[in-house]
Image (tube, rainbow, N blue to C red):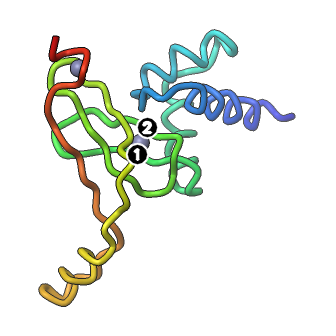
Amino acid sequence: MTRKSKQKEAILKTIRGTTLHPTAEWIYEGVRKEIPNISLGTVYRNLRLLKREGVILELDLAGSISRFDKEAQNHYHFRCEQCDCIVDLDEAVNTELNERLTRQTGFQIFYHRLEFRGLCNGCQS
Ligand SMILES: [Zn+2]
Ligand SMILES: [Zn+2]
């Protein structure tokens, strides 16, 4: 395996090894255990690549640090306002909404992101 593909593999393994929806920095810290001399820039470059290839998702809602998602298929999330955890929700994506808004606005809509905010179970107690 080339150095490049080894780096990419390690990054993907780190994302797939967690349900945390980690930040690039978190992924970087994880990958460094395997490849100590990897740079944060390389991690960012590979994350962009994996995103472009449709392997992972970037959750880049306005005003917050990007989080990365091993599940590339669009899905909804819950984000805790206290601990900032992001959890996948078992709720079908409403594609009818895209069509309705296209009819309404004329915009070509590719997808929508939906994030519910509140307190997770751990933060409520
Ligand atoms: Zn919480
Ligand atoms: Zn997710």
Pointers 1 and 2 in contact (C-beta within 8 Å): yes
For marks 1 and 2, the one nearer the N-term is: 1
Image quarter of residue 35: top right
Image quarter of residue 84: top left
User: On screen, 125 above or below 106?
Assistant: above
What element does badge 1 sit on? strand
User: On screen, 113 above or below 36?
Assistant: below
Identify the residue under disc 1.
58
How many neighbours does mark 2 have within 10 angstroms: few (below 14), some (14-19), or many (20 or more)?
many
Measured from the top left, where is residue 116 in percent x and y? Answer: 19, 43
Q: Residue at x 24, y 74 (%)?
A: 97
**What amino acid is found at the position of numbered circle 2 in the picture?**
Phe
Measured from the top left, where is residue 52 in percent x and y? Answer: 53, 56
Ligand 2 contact, mark 1 (Cβ < 8 Å) = no
| 106 lies left or right of 45 | left
Image quarter of residue 20: top left
Identify the residue under disc 2.
68
**What amino acid is found at the position of numbered circle 1 in the picture?**
Glu
**Mark drawn on residue 40:** none
Q: How far is mark 1 from mark 2, CA to CA?
A: 5 Å
What element does badge 2 sit on? strand
Q: Residue at x 24, y 34 (%)?
A: 79
Give the residue furthest to the right: 1
Q: 58 or 87, which lies in front? A: 87
Ligand 1, by image quadrant, is top left
Measured from the top left, where is residue 115 in percent x and y? Answer: 23, 46
Q: Residue at x 34, y 67 (%)?
A: 111
Q: The C terminus is located in which quarter?
A: top left
How many neighbours does mark 1 have within 10 angstroms: few (below 14), some (14-19), or many (20 or more)?
many
Q: 105 or 97, which lies in front? A: 97
Q: 94 or 15, which lies in front? A: 94
Q: Residue at x 55, y 31 (%)?
A: 15
